[in-house]
């Protein structure tokens, strides 16, 4: 786990693949990764890619990093930082693919700027993700999904595809059948999972 105060925290910007992972593989980032369910699963599925889970909750990241170490996943790492501060950790276009998985919906109108799919965050992602790179979004929350979808359609998002019920759609292959702890809980309660992707 890389966090403020550790030597590498300020040294990897633009150099994650060669300096940390010791390769030239593409970089995939999960935003709000929690315990890293998606990061770990993707790292297992794609050994020729590098994966970084980002969250601000240290206890959650510790669990994810512990699992990664126990499974000898040399292509997985965890970064503790606020999303709005990520330009300090990644160079423009350094990320090839980005996942936003089950973020806090922030339903209050005054909290719109805090939503991880608000305009300011979408602007940020599209700076850090290389042109043509894919941005994925999964949520159980209908209001947040509709908010995000409307925002992306207004912005003219490229190659936008979406579904209001992932497991009743033909888009399941894009998510590799990976389910987070939260996702399993929502599915058990009968809540449809919403998914979209587009290119930066």
Image (tube, rainbow, N blue to C red):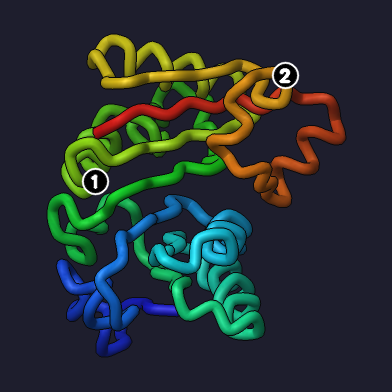
Front label number (2 vs 1): 2
Quadrant location of the C terminus? top left
- Point 40% across, 26% down: residue: 110
Q: Quadrant of residue 56?
A: bottom left
Q: Where residue 180 sits in the image (x, y, percent)?
A: 67, 49
Q: Where residue 89 sits in the image (x, y, percent)?
A: 23, 66
The answer to whether the residues at label 2 and label 1 have Cβ atoms under 8 Å apart is: no
From this view, report whether residue 95 is shown above or below residue 48.
Answer: above
Does residue 51 appear to the left or right of 191 in the view shown?
Answer: left
Q: Which mark is residue 129?
A: 1
- Point 63% across, 74% down: residue: 63
Does residue 9 appear to the left or right of 140 in the view shown?
Answer: left
From this view, report whether residue 24 is shown above or below residue 100.
Answer: below
- Point 29% across, 50% down: residue: 96
> In the rendered structure, which disc, 2 or 1, sits on the residue that comes first in sequence?
1
Q: Is residue 192 visible?
A: yes
Does residue 121 appear to the left or right of 186 in the view shown?
Answer: left
Give the residue number, with chain letter if any, for mark 2.
168
- Point 49% across, 14% down: residue: 146
Quadrant location of the N terminus? bottom left
């Amino acid at each position: 786990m890389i966090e403020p105060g550790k030597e590498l925290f300020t040294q990897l910007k633009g150099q994650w693949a060669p300096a940390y992972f010791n390769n030239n593989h593409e970089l995939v980032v999960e935003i709000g990764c929690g315990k890293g369910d998606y990061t770990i699963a993707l790292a297992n599925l794609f050994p020729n890619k590098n994966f970084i889970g980002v969250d601000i909750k240290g206890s959650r990241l510790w669990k994810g990093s512990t699992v990664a170490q126990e499974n000898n996943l040399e292509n997985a790492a965890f970064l503790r930082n606020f999303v709005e501060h990520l330009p300090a950790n990644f160079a423009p276009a350094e990320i090839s693919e980005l996942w936003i998985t089950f973020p806090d919906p922030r339903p209050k109108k005054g909290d719109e700027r805090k939503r991880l799919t608000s305009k300011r965050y979408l602007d940020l992602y599209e700076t850090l993700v290389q042109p043509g790179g894919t941005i994925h979004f999964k949520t159980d929350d209908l209001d947040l999904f509709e908010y995000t979808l409307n925002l992306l359609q207004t912005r003219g998002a490229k190659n936008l595809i979406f579904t209001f019920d992932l497991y009743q759609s033909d888009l399941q292959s894009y998510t590799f059948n990976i389910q987070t702890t939260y996702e399993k809980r929502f599915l058990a309660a009968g809540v449809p999972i919403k998914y979209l992707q587009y290119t930066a």
